[in-house]
Amino acid sequence: MPSASNTAPAQKKTSLTRVAAASSIGTTIEWYDFFIYGTAAALVFPTLFFPEQSAATATLSSFATFAVAFFARPVGAAVFGHFGDRIGRKRTLVWTLMIMGVATVFIGLLPGYETGAFGAFENGIGILAPTLLVACRFFQGFAVGGEWAGATLLTAEYAPEGKRGLMAMWPQLGVAFAFFLSSGTFLIFALVAGNDAGTDSAFMQYGWRVPFLLSAVLVLIGLWIRVSVEETPVFKKDRDIAAKTTGPKTLPFADAIRHQWKEILIAGGALTSLFSLFYMGTSFFTSYGASLGHTRPFMLAMGMVAAVVFGGAIALSAMYSDRIGRKKVIGTSVALAIVWALVVFPVLDMGSTFSFALALFVTLIIFGIAYGPAGALLPELFQARYRYTGAGLGYNLAGILGGALPPLAAAAMAAAGNTLGIGIMLSLLSAMSMMCVLAMSESSKNKVLADVEGTDSTIATEVP
């Protein structure tokens, strides 16, 4: 008969596997929904929702709707962060997943400006079409604003000592899984429905809608996995202590701003570089590649390969950060980005398929080097009572600085033929990130995540 000491490790392994799956499947689904919007913003929406504008202006308008979500993300971070710090990580994450899924399915059902959906609204619905698109996009960003922090906390607060980077890698890998799925889904339906970009093509009429509608199936799978996970032991301990504390209750958002505003600003600034590289690589490069004459199937296929490549970079950098620290790994990425940003568009402008693939792969590898440790970095910077809120605010501040504004500015500069300006902009953002990285303390040296009311208390992070 096996002893208790022999059976405990098996129980722990199973529990941690479930936690990893729940965090990864959730971020995969949320980012799948996010990425199919970015792909559609580059390939479909300029024609479908802004047909009366010139090609350059329509692309700019399309990326403006893409940017809306980034300004909604801090709102979601504050709202869901409040509930995540009060009622729990798990329950809050269920709501973020549901809201994202509903908003994404609605986008797939929207009629266009002049063309209806599935035969309905035969003549389209005019200006109401882009208005509804913006509303759906806002709710996508609102949900993602609360998703990432909760998913990373779920793994980081369960992680055994010395393995936090490894565990927090799983929600980060959801981005790579999602980019592979979104590119692959669009590729399949582009091949089946045809590569014609005209408004009367099968792809433009209904093919682009299928990836959005498939989100409903993915959300159901994600909810089934996510509800099976117990609340983190760190949060349970924090709530037990808070319940015994007398005095007025404060808001997590107010506490995070009051006590750790420097950490929020430094984290947001340090991660700006990775966001600028990622959204340029996954969204803007698709639009720019089309202007260089690359076909839609080619760019989508390259997106699938790139997802595998930067997924590997995420995994390796996350695990390595447990050995040498988060700061050194992220600093390496930012240093590479400062230089690479100045040469990426000259490489793209060579116009060959090889140069496009090279620019895409290198850009996303540099992103992956920084993104891997970020899942452990942000939870380590904040105290337990407002960790969900603080991590979410720092992450989504970086999303605005690096993910919302650069693609929008890049679209305008590309239309004017100023690709050198795009490279300089990205390099300056990375230089700003480097200053924040240098100002950052090494978070991996903080071995305890369960600090409550400013006092450290060692809490076992193993699954009970």
Image (cartoon, rainbow, N blue to C red):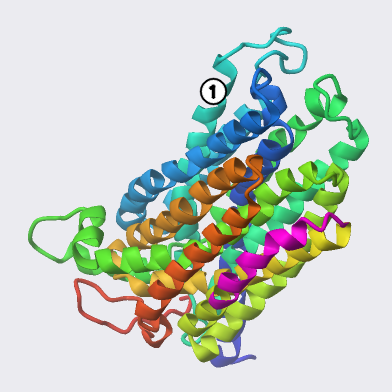
**Where residue 46 sits: x, y (%)?**
68, 29
**Where residue 190 sits: x, y (%)?**
86, 37
In the picture shown, does residue 191 fall above or below 267? above
In the picture shown, does residue 5 fall above or below 194? below
Q: Amino acid at mark 1?
A: Leu
Identify which residue is drawn at 43% across, 41% down. Answer: 72
Identify which residue is drawn at 86% across, 62% down. Answer: 354
In the picture shown, does residue 102 fall above or below 254? above
Q: In the visual, does 179 lie left or right of 87?
A: right
How many numbered callouts? 1
Quarter of the figure with residue 108: top right
Q: Nearer the viewer, residue 293 or 196?
A: 293
Q: Main secondary structure of the magenta part?
A: helix
Residue ID for mark 1: 132
Q: In the visual, does 37 lie left or right of 246?
A: right
**Where residue 384 sits: x, y (%)?**
31, 68
Say which quadrant the N terminus sits in: bottom right
Circle 1: is it few (<14), some (14-19), or many (20+) Cα within 10 Å? some
Quarter of the figure with residue 310: bottom right
Identify which residue is drawn at 55% across, 15% down. Answer: 128
Quarter of the figure with residue 203: top right
Q: Which range is magenta?
A: 335-352
Q: Nearer the viewer, residue 335 or 44?
A: 335
Residue sitting at the far left: 247
336 within the magenta span: yes
